[in-house]
Image (cartoon, rainbow, N blue to C red):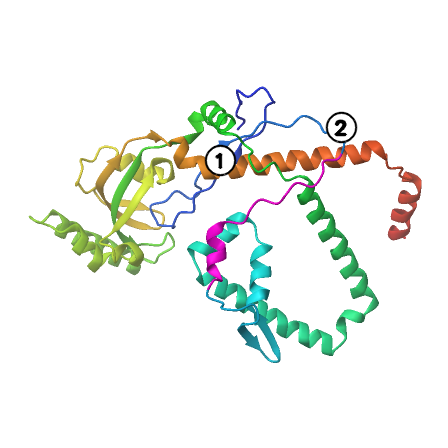
Amino acid sequence: MRFRSSLTLATATGVAVVSALALSPVYAQTAPQPRVAQAPAPAPAKQPARPAAAPAAAPAASNTVAAAKSSGEVVARVGNSDISADDMRTFIATLGPREQAALAQDPTLLSQAVRVMLSNRLVMQELAAKKWDKQPQIEAQLEKVRDNALVELYLQSVSNPPANFPSDDDLQKVYDANRASFLVPRQYQLGQIYIALPKDADKATADAAKKKADEVQKKLKAPGADFAAIARADSAAKDSGERGGDLGLLPEDQIRPEIRTQIAGLAKGAVSEPITLDDGIHFIRLIDTKVPYTRTLPEVRDALVRQIRQQRAAQLRQAYVAELLKQQPPIINELALAKLLDGKKN
């Protein structure tokens, strides 16, 4: 899907934002991925851009390592190798703003990173002892990796959008031009009691499942039936069963069509008749319905800014490389290349 911007700079392609959702038998097999926003394209660069200043690190990230009292303090050790507070500060400084913000929100991620670093230290000690990295073919591969890493880091440095990009005005225009893409579909809060019945089940298993479903239906139809209690006792979906069958709010377009048609006619608090699907038998309770709404700019601002900046960075990179090639056009001996390929065949 393409979105049109009202900005005068140009038209660009939308960027997908995917919401991670827990899987459940109620979910559709493939959930669509909503697309959100696009950014204006930059004017072609006449000269390679000068490296822009790197964006400031998220302030909260620095607090993640504030517990280290001094630069020489050891925070981890494996074998004869130490990891100091300075090592970790250097590591955090190499991360992007999003990763730093994630560390600030979940300090356990830093502990996981330290464990990975310790494992790497052990492997490095092992390979150094064997002088494995001194083999000619390994040295050649390392040089190639180093060159590729340098090129990538340099291109990142020259394609960084200005810190104040996008402006509030530009952001508002992009949001307005793509307002329809921020529509959140109707959502249903559902309860579920699930009885497993595989498609290839033998007769005994199928009979037992159907008997179980009949028992559950009788319980549900009894006066004063407690759906949550029945779900905890009888649902095979243990994750939702422990919550009394509550699946939470599910977007309408991510609910399996066979179930969606059943809940469309349910009153709030009502329970469906048993719904037999290829994975089993479902009893669905409509807990609540949330009408469609459009997410506001403050709700999507951070994600929208990231996407616009990422797109602008990609455009600046492309323009920078194109200008370099224009200044020094490459010459390729196609005949010599063809001979190399012929030699491989022989």
Q: Amino acid at mark 2?
A: Lys
**What's the magenta bit mostly, secondary-structure-wise?**
loop
Q: Viewer-proximal residue, 129 or 238? A: 129
Q: Amino acid at mark 1?
A: Leu
* N-terminal-most mark, 2 or 1: 2
Asked which quadrant contains residue 182, the reply is top left
Q: Badge 1: few (under 14), some or many (20 or more) residues near its Cα, within 10 Å?
A: many
Give the residue drawn at x 18%, y 37%: 268
Q: Viewer-proximal residue, 192 or 95? A: 95
Distance of label 2 from label 1 (alpha carbons)? 28 Å
Q: Does residue 338 lie above or below 174 as drawn? A: below
Asked which quadrant contains residue 159, the reply is top right
Give the x, y percent position of residue 115. 53, 69
Q: Which mark is residue 46?
A: 2
Q: Is mark 2 in CB contact (under 8 Å) with mark 1? A: no
Give the x, y percent position of residue 244. 22, 54
> Looking at the image, which residue sits at the far left?
223
Give the x, y percent position of residue 92. 56, 57
Q: Viewer-proximal residue, 38 or 199? A: 38
| 338 is within the stretch colored magenta | no
Q: Which mark is residue 304?
A: 1
Disc 1 element:
helix
Closest to the camera, between mark 2 and mark 1, is 2
Give the residue drawn at x 83%, y 67%: 136
| 64 is within the stretch colored magenta | yes
Task: Find the magenta span and give its range.
Answer: 48-66
